[in-house]
Amino acid sequence: MLKLGTKAPDFKLEDQKGEVHQLSDYLGKKVILYFYPKDNTSGCTKQACGFAQVYPDILEKNAVILGVSKDSVKSHKKFQEKYNLPFTLLADPDHKVIEAYDVWKEKKMYGKTYMGIVRSTYLINEEGIIEKALEKVKPADNPKEMAEML
């Protein structure tokens, strides 16, 4: 994970509508930047729906939610529509941003070792500085936990 108190790496990624977002577009707002493994999987769906539930509270606190995975724009669009997610999902198929935020790591499942996204969440302040960095978050708890940190 990146160090607290450091400048969050800027990026340019497409959202579920194909529109380009840069982290620097959000200066002046707090940003919950969460990285998740895959659209439409049980844990990722639970986490996304949890963020949808706390979304009004997050907006009230002058903050935004940006979800990032290596899924495509098309996959994000289907995921967002299926669950009526009110926030932005960013596609990073080359996992450049995922790697820049140090969440692309070696994982093990069923005795196999592979590279993948470790479910992680950053809280970035209004000046673009990392305030919190949480690794291996629980999908059900993470949204409420982040809303309470704002």
Image (cartoon, grey):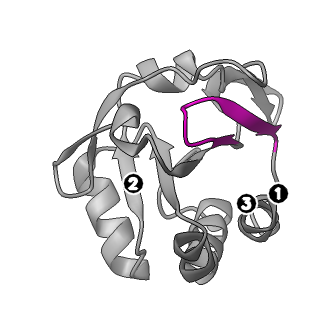
How far is mark 3 from mark 1, CA to CA? 18 Å
* Residue 136: percent from left, percent from top: 82, 42
* Residue 19: percent from left, percent from top: 17, 48
Task: Please give the name of the residue rendered at 37% of the width and 79% of the height, measured from the top-left corner.
Answer: 82
Amino acid at pointer 3: Leu
Res 111 seen here: yes
Q: Give the range drawn in magenta.
A: 122-136
Comparing labels 3 and 1, the label whose residue is closer to the camera? 3
Point out the tag, 2 or 1, that comes first from the N-terminus.
2
Q: Nearer the viewer, residue 117 or 134?
A: 134
Q: Residue 89 carries which label?
A: 2
Residue bearing the label numbered 3: 150
Mark 1 crowd level (few <14, some 14–19, many ≥20, 10 Å Cα): some
Q: In which quarter of the image is residue 92?
A: top left
Task: Please give the name of the residue rendered at 60% of the width and 23% of the height, measured from the top-left corner.
Answer: 101
Comparing labels 3 and 2, the label whose residue is closer to the camera? 3
Q: In this view, does 34 lie above or below 83?
A: above
Q: In this view, does 59 lie above or below 29?
A: below
Q: Quadrant of residue 93?
A: top left
Instruction: Name, please, the residue furthest toward the left.
Output: 18
